Structure formats: C-alpha cells, structure tokens
Amino acid sequence: RELSETSPYNRLEGEGPWGIICNGVSYNYVRDAVADLGIADQARILRIGFCHPLPPRKITEFLKGCEKVLVVEEGEPYLEEGVKAIAQEAGLTLPIRGKAPELFSRLYEFDPGMVRRVVGSYFGVPWTARLPVDLKDVPPIPQRPPTLCAGCSHRATYYEVRKAAEELGIETIYPSDIGCYTLGLLPPLSMADYLICMGSSTGTAGGFSKASGRKVVSFIGDSTFFHSGLSGLINAVFNRHDFTLVILDNGTTAMTGNQPTPATGKGAGGEPLQAVRIESLVRGCGVTFCRVEDPYKVDKFVTLVREGVRHSREHGPAVVVARHPCPLATPGDKK
C-alpha cells in the first residue's frame, strides 16, 4: 500500500473543482475529452496505474479538492467502489459516480466519443456530437484475419508437426494454449482443435488421449509453460499419459510486450537473475524424452516429433522444445 501511495503510476494532473479518476486506456480518452470540451481549467485528473492496493491517502487528498467526481473505468466498478469506500471512511460526502444507466455501462469497451459524451453530461458542459464520416463511396475493406508475424518460427513448427503426423499415418488432436501461437488455429495452418484456458494444453492432453484413443500433440509457449504448464505435465508423467508436448520457445513473452521469461536470466528491470532452462525443468518433472531443436532445421525437427510420438506410447509424455528467437524481440531477449 505504501508503494501504491508513492508510485509514479498514480499521478495527478490539472486543477479545478471537477474530479475524474481513471485507469488504463480510459485515461487517454479522458485527456481527449477534457481538451475537446474545453474544461482543462476546471477538471483535475487522477490516473491510477498502480491499482491494487489502492492508495487511500492520495485518493482522499484528491477528493477533498473536488465538488464532484466521475470514475472512468471499463468493466466492473472496481475503482468506483474502492473510491467510495475510501470517501466514506474519510467522512467525505461529495457525489462520486461511474457505472449508471445514464453514465457508463459495465459492458464492452469504451471509445473516445462515449467518454466525451458522459464527461460533458455529468459536469453539465454543452457539447455537440461529431457527425460520422460519410463512407458511402468507400468500397468494403477486405477481410484480414490476424496472423503470425513475418519471420515467426511457429509456422515452421506447425508445418513439421503436421508432416510428422502424416508420415506416421496417425489421426491427431492438437490442443493449443494462450499466446501468439494461438493464431495457429486459423487457416491455412489449422493447427489447433481447441483452446480452453492458460495451461489447458498440458492439462487436457492426457484426458483426450485416453478418451479418444487418438494421438495428441499439444502446443504451449515458453512463458505460458512456466506460468501454467508444469502442473499438467507432472500429472501426465505420473499417469504416463500418451501425448507429445511441443514447447514453442521464442525466448520472450511475445504476445503482451516482450517481457522476460525465467529462461532469459533477467528480471523485469533488466537485472541479472538465475536462468531456468526449460529442458532442465522438463527433465526434472520426470519426462524421459526431452529434445531441443531449431524448427528451421526441418528434417531434424520432423524426426524428433516422430520419435517423441513413438516414445510416448510406451513411456508417457514426450517433450520437444522448438527453440528459435522471436523476430520482434530485442537483442537482449534473443539471448
């Protein structure tokens, strides 16, 4: 809580009797709304970036300088309820609103126009809705589904797993997991049959292999494996489940900003830490077949997948680590 009170991510901007408390992308919409409505000299903004736990002293001081407050947050009223509780404990009785039929909904995402309308309405500021852009003469935009980045080695991995399955002549189920590699479910790759939750590719693979009698080859990313894949793999070793796990190791948390993983040997601030090797962890779980290969070495990788499939039939889960750096990672991440 003390860290939250002094965090630079919780900051105050502007001066005036009207208060706006916001977080996340809503902050950007609020900044635009204040500028568009011309109320920069009347509104003060408290941006909460460190929100759990909330900073009660900072919020109390903010509320004492306001006549009324609007809380702008997407989803459930976490900030609103916390701010109201802090105000009650401090004996403050100013109006604090956020989620209401005439204000913000709990549903869906906000947009700049919505925030501008609600801010103007709540503080009684005249505003004119902008006319929509006339698009009658614009042809339909071609559909462009999301796809893996240019240079992503996951494409090679998917190709090689499918090739190995074809060479073995087996009918295969492909569980996937949470990460950028989830895009493998889309054509033309079509290398995912289901995705339930983070860690589900290891947790469900054994069950599907027993219930269906089909071979299972599941996919999980390096950071997802550290986060949620270990318990399922240990369970599979204990029960000698027949599936092959392919760990897509690109050396970073590619989907959400290239944060370091335990395998990179550095912390969030770049400080050196003890690196945890995926293959050592896998073998420590009791997996007897664990191989590492660059998916751009096509023939070698196909061979490893075939060997893993054969091994798991008799000895329990096999693991193949597809190791190639993410093309968008920084040089430090690629290590």
Image: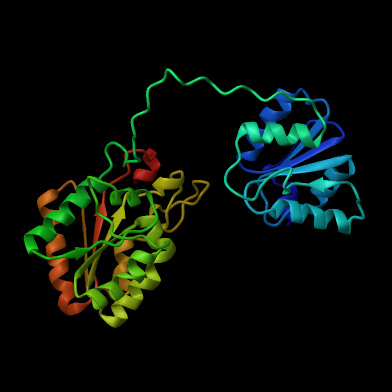
Query: Can residue 192 be seen in the rendering of this structure?
Result: yes
Q: Residue furthest bottom?
A: 239
Viewer-nearest residue: 78 or 238: 78
Q: Is residue 14 left or right of residue 247?
A: right
Q: Residue at x 49, y 51 (%)?
A: 267
Q: Quadrant of residue 237?
A: bottom left
Viewer-nearest residue: 325 or 120: 120
**Picture layout, residue 299 above or below residue 257:** below
**Picture layout, residue 247 above or below residue 213:** above
Q: Residue furthest front?
A: 136
Q: Is residue 255 left or right of residue 247?
A: right
**What colouring style does the render use?**
rainbow
Residue 236: % across, % down: 30, 76
**Picture layout, residue 6 above or below residue 292:** above
Residue 102: % across, % down: 74, 43
Quadrant in the picture for the N terminus:
bottom right
Q: Is residue 13 left or right of residue 176?
A: right
Q: Residue furthest top?
A: 137
Residue 34: % across, % down: 73, 28
Q: Is residue 166 left or right of residue 256?
A: left
Viewer-nearest residue: 118 or 256: 118
Q: Quadrant of residue 305?
A: bottom left
Q: Residue at x 69, y 55 (%)?
A: 78
Total number of numbered discs in the rendering = 0
Q: Residue at x 53, y 46 (%)?
A: 269
Residue 142: % across, % down: 33, 30
Query: Can residue 30 be seen in the rendering of this structure?
Result: no
Viewer-nearest residue: 70 or 307: 70
Q: Quadrant of residue 197?
A: bottom left
